[in-house]
Amino acid sequence: MTAAPGVAPALTPGRGGGGPRRRSRPWGIRVAPYLFLLPNMAIFGLFTIWPAINGFNISLYESPNGRVFRWVGLGNYQKILTDEEFWQVARQTAVYALAFVVLTAAFSILLAVLVDQQRRGKTFFRGVFFVPVLVSPVVVGLVWNWLLERQGGLVNTALGTSIPWLVDSSWAMVSIIVVGVWMQVGFFMLIALAGLQGIDPSIYEAARMDGASRWKQFWSMTLPLLQPSIVVIVVLSTIRGFEAFDFIYTLTGGGPTGATTLIVQYIYENGFVSPIRYGHAAAAGVILFVAIFTLTLVNWAISRRREAV
C-alpha cells in the first residue's frame, strides 16, 4: 500500500519490528517559528524588559538634584512606605481602581447583552459605544472639563443644578470615575460581546422551552458561560484602573488639594517635576508593578479555582 500522491507519510516503522517512529523534521523547519518570533521578542525586550530592569536599578539610587546618583539600597522604598502623601495617593488609587473595575465589568456586560439582542443597528451601536476608546485621553479630559463646569457646563445646565463636579473633593473623585468608565467601557463591551457570541443559541432555546425567564437565563446561563470573558475584563480593567493618569491630569490636575491624585501622577511628579527625584519615582513604579502583578495572579488563581469547581 502506498501513500496518496503528494502526501508524505508522517510515520515510519521502527527498527527491529518496533512501533512507528516519528520522522525528524529538518533543522530549518524546527527553527523557523522562533525566527518569526525574534523581531517581536527583541522589541518587547528593548522597550519593556530593559526599562523595567533599569527602573529597578535606578530605584536603588538617590538623586536629589536629578543628576548625581548615590547608592542608597532600599532607602527609597523605606522613605515611600513612611510617606503619608504616598499612602493618601495609594488609598485614592485603590478607590478609583475598585470602582472602575466593578462599574466597567457591570456596564460592559449589560451593554453587550443589549447590543447582542438588537436585530437591527447592531454594528451602529457597537461603534457608538466604542468611539470614546478611540479619542485621545487628553482630549477626553479637556472636553469633560468643559461639560462639568459648575457655571455654564452642559451637565449642570441639563440637570438644572450647580454641582461643583471638579472643585469639590468628593464630587471630583466621582467625576473621574464616571469619565474613566465612559471612556473605556466600549472596549470591554467588545470582549463581553465576543464571549456572548460564542455561546450556543440552542441552550437558550432549550431554556425557553422549559419556561425559564430572561433573568433566569441571564443569571444561570449567561453569566457562568461568560466567566472566561469576565476574567479577562477584570484583569485588564484592574491594570487600567491602576494606570489611570492622562485624562485625570487634564480634567482635574490631581486636585482639588490632591483629592484625585493617583499613583501614576505621583510617580510623574517625582520623576519629572522639580525637585526631581528619579530614585523615589522609580521605587514607586516598582511598588505599582508589584501591586498590579499580585492582583493579576490573585484574579488568575480565583478563576482557575472556579473552573476546577
Image (cartoon, rainbow, N blue to C red):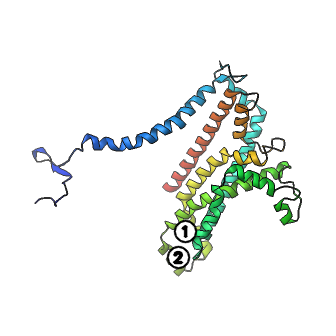
Q: Nearer the viewer, residue 159 or 295?
A: 159
Q: Locate the N terminus and report the quarter of the image it occupies.
A: bottom left
Residue 309 is at least partly visible in this image: no
Q: In this view, does 290 lie above or below 191?
A: above
Image: 20 above or below 112? above
Amino acid identity at mark 1: Met
Q: In which quarter of the image is residue 149?
A: bottom right
Q: Where is residue 48 in the image (x, y as percent from the top left)?
A: 54, 37
Q: Which circle marks residue 207 in the picture?
A: 2
SS category of the residue bearing label 2: helix
| 156 sits to left or right of 53 | right
In the depicted view, which residue is nearer to us: 181 or 227?
A: 181
Q: Percent position (x, y) of residue 30?
A: 30, 43
Q: Which residue is painted at 24% across and 42% down in the image?
A: 26
Query: Within 10 Å of the Cα at label 2, are there few (<14), some (14-19), or many (20+) other Cα atoms?
Result: some
Residue 96: give x, y in percent of width and height. Answer: 72, 49
Q: How far apart are marks 2 and 1 (CA)?
A: 9 Å
Residue located at (79% from left, 47% from top): 252
Question: What's under tag 2, amino acid-wise?
Answer: Ala
Image mark for residue 221: 1
Q: Which mark is residue 136?
A: none
Q: Which residue is drawn at 67% across and 51% down?
A: 136
Decide: marks 2, 1 in contact (CB < 8 A)?
yes
Q: Which residue is drawn at 63% across and 56% down?
A: 133
- Rendered image quadrant of residue 233: bottom right
Residue 122 vs residue 84, the one in the foreground: 122
Quarter assignment of residue 124: bottom right
Instruction: Work out whether residue 203 can be spotted.
Output: yes
